[in-house]
Structure formats: C-alpha cells, structure tokens
Image (cartoon, rainbow, N blue to C red):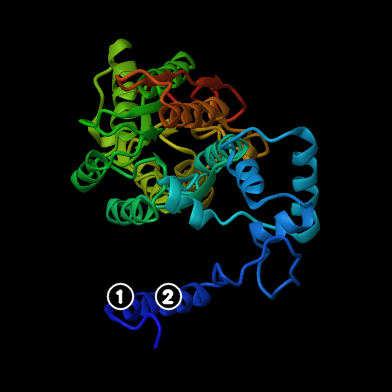
Amino acid sequence: MVGKGPGFTRNTCFGRYLTLVLGAIGFETFREMDLSKPRGRKSGAPTMIDVAHTAGVSIATVSAFINGSANVSAELMLRIESAIREIGYRRNAAARSLKTGATHTIGLTVADIRNPFFTDVVAIVQDVLNRAGFAVMLCSSDEDTAKQDEQIRLLLERMVDGLIIGPAGEDEVTRRLVRSTRKPVVLIDRMIAGLGVDAVVLDNRAAVLEAIQYLLGLGHRRIGYISGAAGTATGHDRLEGYRAALANAGITPDPGLVRDGRFREADGYRAAMELMTLPERPTALFSANNLMVIGAMRAIRDLGLSCPGDVSVACMDDFPWADVFSPRLTTVAQPVKAIGEQAASLLLNRLAGNAPPEPLVLTLRGQLIIRSSCAAPTVRQSA
C-alpha cells in the first residue's frame, strides 16, 4: 500500500479526527469547501459565510466590516448591510467575547429596584450604555448585603466588562470582591469606605440639613426623624445632617425622636406609629427616603391624624406621585439624571482608558422642593 508507515497512519488518523470535529461544529472539511459557489441555506442561524455569499464578497471582507478591523469601501459596506438585513444575520457575541476578552456587557446591582430613585437611575444608566453599544445585566439586592455579594460574584462570572453598584451596605465581602477584580467599578448613591473606585453620590448631610432648617424655620422644635439603615453611608450622613441642623438651632438632639426605618416602607410605617404615639409626639416628621415616607403617611392616616394639621411631613427623594399626594409632599430631590449619566460616563471612560489613575468621586447637590405637606405647628412645644 502506497504511503504505508507510521507517519501516514498518524496523519490519516489526525485528518479523520479533524474532519469529525469540524463536522460536529458545523463546518465542512477544507477539501470539500468551495467558497466560490453559492450554497443552499442550511437550517439554523445565518453565518458570516451566508452574508458573504449573499453580498458577493469574501468572508474576510465581511469579517473586517463586522469587527472594524480594516477599512471597507462604502459600496461594499452597503452590500454587506443589505445582506445582513436580508438573511437576518446576528453577530455571535459569545464567540466575539472569546476572541477579544470583552463581552460588551455591564453588571448593574442596586439596593432596591422597587425604590423609584433606583428605578429612574437604572433607566438612565441603561440608556447611556445602550447607546455606547453595551448591554446591561441588572440585579436588585433588596437591601441585603449577602444577596449583593452573591450577585457581584455572578456578574463577574458572566465576564461583564465593568460594574456599577448601588450598595446595600458596607460589607467586608463586597470590599474583597471589588478589590480582587480588575474590572472598573463605579459606586452610585452610597459610598463604601476603603474602596478606591469611582463614585457618584449626593451631599446627603447638606441635603437633610437644609430640609430640617426649613422645618425649624416654620417653628417646629420637636422633629421626628425616620432614618435609613445605619450601616449605609447614606443612612449615616443623612442622620448627621438632621443632628447638625438641630445643633445649629441650639436644640439638643433627642434620641427618642429617632427611629430606624431601614429604607423600607413597612419599617417606615412602624417607625411613624412609634413616634406619633409618644406622650409628647413630634409636630413634624422627616423621612430619610421616599419608601419610608409612604409608610409614614399610612401610619398618620391610620391614627386618625391629619397632615399638615397635626404633623408636617417631608422626605428625601422626590418621586412621581409626591406631587399628587394629598397633601402634596415636600421633598429633597436628587439629580437623578445627572447621577445616572455621570456613573455611566465614568465607567465608559475607564473602559476606554480615558480616565485619570486616581478614582473620581462626584458629589452632587439636592434640591428642596416645598409643597403643601408642611406648615407651622398648631400646638406649643418645649424646645
């Protein structure tokens, strides 16, 4: 037999093995492939080969057009685009990510997607990233740091190109996960101490200080405060703003007028019930976020009290129905659009290598929106 020998046997076996492998993944053997002749469409998704045949160009030209690896003439671009539309070709993102190491996907986890603040920020972030060619994988940790940590692990396992995190809290596991990744990370709304990453946050202390000063200016001296989760930067800073406003007015903060509402509606209800059933109840309530104020307003109603007749109410975070509440709610609005746009831009700049080596922390200002839920107190108070 001609060619008989160890070398021939090995080559023959390798050739048969290669043919089987290529056949298993949908390719023809090189010997049988004739790109000069159109092939009938096989079942399954259209390929670059199908685009090339339909457009009458080489596969290399189609690849250069899709990947942007080389210049393609305007005439050929039109033919390729027309062929893509005609046969419904979709780019294989998984194959591309294996080749480039990039998935063009961003992981986004927020503390509570039910909170209108986070809902609005997510919509803006997604819009900016989508326009830049990135998909978004969204998670909500429900104010649970353990769930947050698991979500960050999942997003990193999915090989996202970067992360935007609205933290549920300052968890040590979160710190380790963020420090261990080489992916760019941007924090929104809440800082995590000890992490050298970009962030977009509100000046929470100043925002609450201004709102409490407004209530003090109306004549209130006993101001109840429904705080957010103590383990978060926003919970801490907003409470500091409340205390600072009272101290500036010569009022010693009373710990008995503060209740932890954990940024949740149900806890806001509980906190307001406790405050409004004190022997000497407050004449004004301030809620550290919008979900808790909804619970507080239900508590006021269930106690048969009126707002602002019996108690004035104000809160952090404006939201769409604050202006249609009865009474219309006084709020501190966060610059939601700016927060979302700046967070997405910071991440895109990091990915493009256009950001400075040091982390950027952008601190924005809130806006007090005065409506009809606050009025001068109707009873005398002790300072």
Q: Nearer the viewer, residue 106 or 243?
A: 106
Residue drawn 63% across the image and 38% down it: 320
Residue indicated by mark 2? 15
Left or right of 84: which side holds 292? Answer: left
The relative height of residue 158 versus residue 76 in the rendered view (above or below) is below
Tag 2's secondary structure?
A: helix
Residue 139 visible from this viewpoint:
yes
For label 1, the residue is 7
Q: Total marks drawn? A: 2
Between 156 and 231, the one lying in front of the other is: 156
Crowding near the residue tagged with mark 2, few <14, some 14–19, many ≥20 C-alpha atoms within 10 Å: few
Amino acid type of the residue tagged 1 in the rendering: Gly
Residue 295: x and y in percent read: 48, 48
Q: Amino acid at mark 2?
A: Gly
Q: Which part of the image, by quadrant, shows the N terminus?
A: bottom left
Residue 203 x %, y %: 39, 21
Secondary structure under tag 1 reads helix
- The picture quadrant where one finds residue 245 is top left
For residue 78, the mark is: none
Residue drawn where x is 42% and y is 75% of the image: 15
**Quadrant holding the C terminus:** top left
Please tell me how crowded label 1 is: few (under 14), some (14-19), or many (20+) other residues with Cα within 10 Å.
few
Q: CA distance from mark 1 to mark 2?
A: 12 Å
Q: Nearer the viewer, residue 10 or 134?
A: 10
Comes first in the chain, label 1 or label 2:
1
Q: Image height check: is 82 above or below 247?
A: below
Q: Where residue 82 sits in the image (x, y, percent)?
A: 80, 49
Q: Position of residue 146 (x, y in %)?
A: 27, 55
Q: Nearer the viewer, mark 1 or mark 2?
A: 1
Whether residue 303 is visible: no
Which quadrant of the structure image shows residue 40?
bottom right
What residue is shown at x 35% (from left), y 33% (from top)? 190
